[in-house]
Amino acid sequence: MTPGPLRFEGREVPVLDGDTVASALFRSGVRTFSRSLKGHRRRGLYCGTGECPNCTVTVDGVPGVRSCITPAAGGMRVERARGWPSAEHDLLHVADLAHPLMPVGFYLKTFIRPRFAWRMAERVIRRATGSGPLPADAPATRTTSRHVRCETIVVGAGIAGLTAALEAAAGGERVLLCDEFAIGSRLAPGPTLDAVRALETHARATPAIEILERYAALGLFDGPTVPLAGPDELVQVRADRVVVATGATESHQLFPGNDLPGVWLGRAASAMAALHGVAPGRRVVVVASTTEGVEHLQALVAAGARVVAALVPAAFVDEVPHEAEAIVDGELVEARGHGRLRSVIVRELGERRRIACDALVLSTGLGPRDELARMAVNEPVRLMGDVALEADEPALGGGYLCLCEDVALHDAEQAWAEGFRSAEILKRYTTATMGPCQGAMCGRALACFARGRAEAADAGSGARTTARPPLRPVALQTLAAPVHEVIEKRTGLHDTHVAAGATLGWSSGWKRPISYGDPADEYRAVRERVGLMDVGTLGRFLIAGRDATTLAGAVFAGRVEDLEPGRSRYVLALDDGGYVVDDGLLCALENGSYLLTSTTGGAERMDARLREWAERLGLHVHVLDRTSELGAILVAGPRARDLVGGLTDDPIDAASLPYPGHRELTVAGVPCRAIRNGFVGELAFELHHPRSNGPRLWTSLRRAGLDLGIAPFGLAALELLRMEKGHVYLGQDTLPDDTPAKLGLARAVDMTKPWFVGKAALERLAVLPSTRRLAGLVFEGAADGAGLRGAPLTIGAAVVGRVTSAERSPVLDRAIGLGWIRGGRDGFPSELRAGNAVARVVPTPFYDPEGTRIRG
Amino acid sequence: MAELRTWDPTVTSVLASAEACDRVGDLPGACRVSPGEVALVGDVSEAAVAAAVVRLDPDAVVLDVSDGWGAHSLDGPGSREAFARLSELELPTAGSLVGEVAGVGVRILVDGDRIDLLVPAMVSAHVRDRIETDCAELLR
Amino acid sequence: MTLEIACPNCGARPHTEFAFGGEERPHVSPDVATDFERVFYPSNAEGPQRERWYHVLGCRSWFVVTRDTRTNRIG
């Protein structure tokens, strides 16, 4: 612990050994620790165990810090969060006076008209409420995440938790024991602490028990899995069994004045006196209905606090120290004071009596901290210790129900009167239990309230509201720890592209060059000379074995049996509904096996598909994913053959390597499989090669192509090149229910095949009239594709389609595109509007319709 | 502290019937990916393996796929602690398994403190980056 | 946060290693008339359901498990 004072709102506050931020501030005279959410009421120390919101302050710029459980350190900067101009003198407290004008749920019923009123009101409301601004200059730190596997996880390291951990370890299990605080740190010296220390020594000496202190359990998930948020890591614990030994809180009582600074729960008051040496007040009244309460009373007196009165049940009267006046079977009626406690009203033997005091200490019952256990649906969870107790029912006499959200008991009564009649709906309407404590203090009281008023038949309305994670406030960076950003895939030419100054972008999980400079120049290079593109992202699969042809025939819609070695064919993959899901190029190899290329984005899906059908049909076939192993470079343009020819001794004339076909070639010393490809509409060779040879091949091609005017091209140029050919991008130009016919790809289907995936659906659909198709479009009155992409296609006021792709075509000197259009009995429209532009339906391809350039 | 080393592995893929894969499944450096697939890491005689396998499955594929893989090894005390930050998998004392590490499917070879991660070449840079970031203070 | 699925080759693994392949259904129908129902009307049982899973981040095998759709218990 760093020595020295801490700084609090401009002054120094001394810090003693063992101080929490709250005890240091309290000792220095701070009584108002925060202002409540809505009414800006003064709030003082209350629970002492980090559950209520009252002591929340901003430490070193970080808001939401529970000062009662945060160890103080020298040099800390502490401020109170709410209050203007200051928490001590808060003008916004007028909101509390205006409470009658702002009944429960008022913001749901007001500021509706005029509309600008809400915008103004919202700005004011936001300023006035909230937990404080986030630190603007906090550096982003990384929280790590790790996984732990064990047989039993024990949450809570008190007596019950330590005992359960030791039992499980003795049974031969790996145990993880966790506690949100350091073991025993919240206990004053005494027999309980001695017992804890003894068990702790034993547990630390047991190797099978891993102990994590200051790790808070965030929830219970399927597995069972319990994530633990520690100081700088997230630990995801996967166990077979969960033991919840989280103990119980002291009950939050509802009576008028229950939220005044000066009203304490027993543990907070006795810890302040016995652990930190500061009396909770000069005149203390104690209400103790439990054994623990009596222990707190005795601890207060032993620490020197002046207890003027103690309300106890008859059974405990002998335990009351003689310094205090024992009031037997008295009833606490009200706490009074303006901004702080001045007196309490008690009823004794039917008579009301006022006792002047500045501290009221309440230990009237226990409520199990069972939220973690209540999250279990099917998981094996055991409750041990105080958490397994039956909860005491809190008295509902008045005052504040939910401290976090500033919901008074009369707000709940009004909500009930308005017709909101179950704990769950009251929660949503009043926002009770929806604050930082998530019902730790008030959840039981809310359920009690509903149960007390509901009809006997309506049992569910009084049930506790659903327990949800996170159980403790947790920073987003902790939750983000195990989340990995998108996995970036790279080809073997990645560094080459970076060195060439390419602009890279995301495309289906890969980082790919969008452009190396000007996409228009790149486009022209491909149309007029020769261009180079890295297409190593394409899925590549080897399909081998005696049933290879059977598999290909089953998963693709077209005929494959007649595909001869050295030839390739465009193939379509359909789903069971007959809809197009993937496409690719199937190349038959010498020995009855195939090399299949698929789209970049569809590679994983294709892999899964091939394996699925091999398994379902019981085929003897081997599938090898070669996507990572093979690079691929597309050489495209009228000079492509000149370029490749100059680097290979193998023949690549039209007869030796026809379209569509493929063959093995050695190019610049690199062994390749060259596949003729027509995607960009020019003579093109797709050179598939071992990944590690990629840079050498690329550099050789670029160098040899200098005289030819070669240029590398990226995705931007590709978009235009393929569009001028009317080639479809699955997922961009297609809809989930596009059949081959709707896409104009019926030629890729062979209905004479006995079976393929989706065949029956196509048979079924064949009898239905065609009502939608993908069409080529030429636009008049639009400069380029921007603004056209995604635009609806209309006839009059009716929307009859949508533009899926659009670009300005240099060849046609106007904007072109693809889009789907709806037709009817009279066929399909030929002229439509796309915004301000006129769209004419034209046949595709737009460029070189005969495909002579591809087939060269 | 564990040491992280990135290297280019030699990998031979064997795709064959289960019976044929059994033949080569126990060779040093073998990772039995599935009943029908074995990955052999390290120098092997492709011809010898092919011969052994093809006898039982004439359709078997035996191929040098080294280009498709990158390898990252964690070696030394603390290697398992580092691994726990990357994956939920429980590692045996020695052996091989296939599963998710750093979000990708990885082939793992373990021997005591040494953990070899074979990852597809296209995500090798990602995995290296992930190990360096998540295990920073555990690595030499 | 993880459902565990037992891959027949690799053993129990977190569900994040797998891809879900849907309810198990025959891949062909006796006739075109019943094909629509086969494709678009799964039985969607409340209770034990046979379903296909794919070990995408592991051995890349397909297999069938029985999962209770009410409790998420497998097997």
Image (spheres, coloured by chain):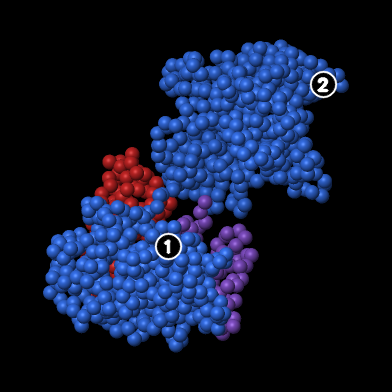
Badge 1 element: loop
Return the x and y of residue A255 as percentages of the image width and height.
75, 27
Chain A palette colour: blue
Can I make out residue A581 in this image?
A: no
Q: Is residue A845 left or right of residue A301?
A: left
Above-or-below relation of B129 to A619: above
Q: Is residue C47 left or right of residue A740?
A: right
Q: Which chain is purple?
A: C
Identify the residue shown where x is 32% and y is 48%. B129
Chain B palette colour: red
Identify the residue shown where x is 49% and y is 26%. A59
- Quarter of the picture containing the N terminus of chain A is top left
Give me the chain letter of mark 2. A
Return the x and y of residue C65 as percentages of the image width and height.
52, 67
User: Label 2 belongs to which residue?
Assistant: A347
Q: The residue under label 2 is which amino acid type?
A: Arg
Return the x and y of residue A804 as percentages of the image width and height.
45, 65
User: Label 1 belongs to which residue?
Assistant: A781
Give me the chain letter of mark 1. A
Return the x and y of residue A598 as percentages of the image width and height.
36, 69
State which quadrant residue A607 falls in: bottom left
Camera-nearest residue between A554 and A323: A554
State which quadrant residue A629 falls in: bottom left
